[in-house]
Image (tube, coloured by chain):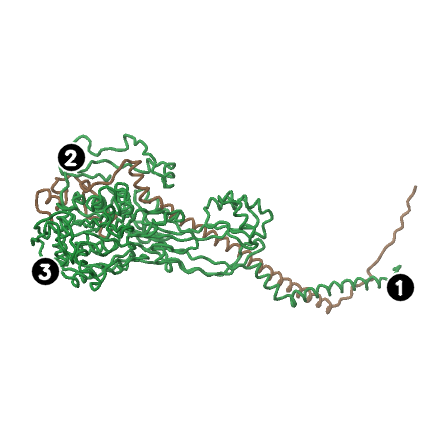
Amino acid sequence: MSRTLTTSDPTPRLWALGAVLLLWAVAVLARLFFLQVVDYAWLTRKAERQQSRTIEIEARRGVIYDRDLHPLAMSLMVDSVFAVPGEITDLPAVTSQLAQVLGLDARDLQGRLAASRNFCWVARKITPEQSHRLRALNLHGIYFQPESKRFYPKRDLAAQVLGYVGLDGNGLGGIEQEFDREVRGQSVRTLVQVDAHRRSYTHDEQKPEAGENLVLSIDQNIQYIAQQELEAAMQRTHAKHGTVIVEDPHTGEILALANWPTFNPNDYRNANPAAMHDPAVSDPYEPGSTFKLITVSAALEEKLTRPDEMIDCQMGSIEVGGRRIHDHHAFGVMSVTDILKHSSDVGAIKLGLRLGDDRFYRYIRAFGIGQLTGIELPGESRGLARPPQRWTKMSIGAISMGQEIAATPLQMASVFATVADGGIYHAPHLIRGRFQGDPPAALPPIPATAGRRVISGATANEMKMMLEQVVLAGTGQHAKLDGYTAAGKTGTAQRVDPGTHAYSKHNYIASFGGFAPLRDPAVVILTVVDSPVGLHEGGDAAAPVFKAIAERVLPYLRVPQDIATPPSSRMQMVKAVDVRETSDPVSDLALDAAAPAPAPPELEASAVIPVFTPAPLPRGTVVLDYDGGITVPDFNGKSLRAVSELCQTLGLDPSLIGSGMARSQQPAAGTHTIAGAHVVVQFSR
Amino acid sequence: MTDIHFRQVIDNSRLVRVSDPARRREQQVFIAVMACLFLLGFGYAWQNYQMVHLGYQIEDVRHKTAGLNEWNRALQLEQSSLRDPLRVYALAETRLGLESARPGQIVQLDAGVPGDRNSGAVMADLRPASESLPAAVDAGAAGAPTPR
């Protein structure tokens, strides 16, 4: 039995529904066709633009170390701020906030942002505090890009040697410029997938090739001493410029190279441009009487004279090439040693005349004058040493006493180093080593360079004896050292007046080159003081700088004294105060800001304790109390934190290299050492 | 008022479900295929989700590592600036009242550890002057010729 329950026919409605569904399906298919076929290429490009970003990963610039692996220049990643002006809705408000945080001119910033729709730098390499404040504002259309920024933790220490790095990461002076390609590394461009919030969720595994690390021959403590003493001399003499070079005569390594005025490479944009170039290698000067070192050495080497030969200095006047040259003093007959000791121009000219043009020129070149030393610094000058064909008849007279010729301070330092090293010339250099990654526990020793013999050892020894007389009883008596023998030569050269093109009678370049101790010189120190006011002689303006530096550097280098010191300068024994006990964080911050050093706080009476208060020390006896000394522990297998804490407890000065567990150390475990001794610990995983 | 209820007995026992094995198999196959398809789809989607999720985690860890490395470098920089000779000398001279030792105030008691300039001589005991001072100094003090 069938029964019809429906009251109406549903077929039209089903048809209508079917038609709607069909239309919808057709519409979807049509849209898909357009998206997948017609607009495929365009949409794919658009999607790639939205979902992926190509970023440049900047290679980290290598670290520059001093000879004991103290970092002198290193890079950190900091934020740079850029805007996409098209995304900024309220430009004046955003500009105002940016300007307030970054210390910018709001009107200028608004103008820059208004000029572009897609990209505009707001500020490069901002401080972490500024970045933190800006991120907290969460401004729409403002983005951050990490960039590498160069820091110089020792501020103006060796500033001209290190140079500086510009905003775009290019080395713009000194070692930074000379080794820019090696130090800056190889940046890579990599594709990053980002989501709608521009957060990256995957990217290629490409890594930039980090730059090489450089180890300089500079010693930061010697450099500091040189800069400090040079600055003191500049304030004393009111000179325009000054240069000090400290060199190891046996290797040619430059231990310190200081110039005044100097600058802070962290803030190079506000530096005096004149302070940013390095006159030690790029500004030749007439060396004056220090050049007599070459004249006398050449004459001795050629057996044209002897140290004790008596020469008539003609009461301070001689005619050369038709022109009469007057000495600074009317000297009569005197030995060659005395000619050097009293810096007689006439005596030096007579020795130069004995040499003759060609032979003299050959020695000038052999000592490195007129040619590049090859120092690893940009802008080195060759100096001025014209060949004999271009000499006038009076040139040999002028050159014999250090005029009509120009040498850089570095070249003159090398001349003194040649004599100090027994007549062997070593090219001066600044680079001790280069490496990738973490520094090794100990740098491989630099193979000793053979050097080039310029004068014989016998001649060099004779020169040393004669130069010692200069310090003991000649023009360089202000360079006489306490506790060490020393030798050297003063120089006082007239500057050429740019107005008259004649030698000025008011502007001088005072210089002193010397070395100590005499038997086995540890350092050569050259000091050049440009345009001192008042006492302008090399012996007055420059020799005291030599003395001040040498008397601090030689003990630092642990060079044994070779002469007795006056009893009055013997020790006053005090026990050093533990810095940790008196350290005041607030004052530390004040010091960090490179402001003038804070006023010394009153030391408590108990802080300085004479070790032997009651009984006077027996004459000549020295007792040091190192609280029993320190035995270097075995760090092997210990973590970085454990080693650090152990060193801090023991009072050692650690250099922790690498990460992971301690694998090697220097000095070895069990070594008996002093508080504050330097310990290098190498870690690896 | 009395309600009257009628009772009607419904007996469906006459209705018997006709077994259709072919249809059942079809249904089972259909369900199995759909389940497979669902699992495949789900697996694909899960994989993609995990890929993105892990990508975020990796990026996060990468950022943390980079941040820690950067922090490490920042600490090294700070350590280096704290060891700035200018600062150390300022602390020594102004706060502790120290000054650089003069040549006569330094006596080397030991040659130190070979090759390590910074670690060296160490212990001293009370000895006569002639023993505690370097030979050259004694020679100089005694009027012997110094190396010239």
Foreground mark, 1 or 3?
3
Task: For label 3, count other residues whose C-alpha is less than 10 Å away and answer few (under 14), some (14-19) or many (20+).
Answer: few
Q: SS at mark 3?
A: loop
Write down the quadrant of residue B93 in the picture. top left
Tag 2: amino acid: Leu
Q: Are marks 1 and 3 in contact (CB under 8 Å)?
A: no
Give the answer, above or below, for where A373 lies relative to A327.
below
Mark toward the start of the polypeptide (1 vs 3): 1
Nearer to the camera, B113 or A170: A170
Chain letter of disc 1 in the image: A
Q: CA distance from mark 2 to mark 3?
A: 53 Å
Chain letter of disc 2 in the image: A
The residue identified by callout 3 is: A303
Write down the quadrant of residue A44 in the picture. bottom right
User: In the rendered view, does A15 fall on the left or right side of A532?
Assistant: right
User: What colour do you see for chain B?
Assistant: brown
- The answer to whether one can see residue A46 in this image is yes
Tag 1: amino acid: Ser
Chain identifier matching the green colour in the rendered picture: A
Q: SS at mark 1?
A: loop
Q: Are marks 1 and 3 on the same chain?
A: yes
The residue identified by callout 1 is: A2
Count of labels in the image = 3
Where the N terminus of chain A falls, by quadrant? bottom right
Mark toward the start of the polypeptide (1 vs 2): 1
Check residue A617 in the rendering and tell me which mark sits there, or answer none.
2
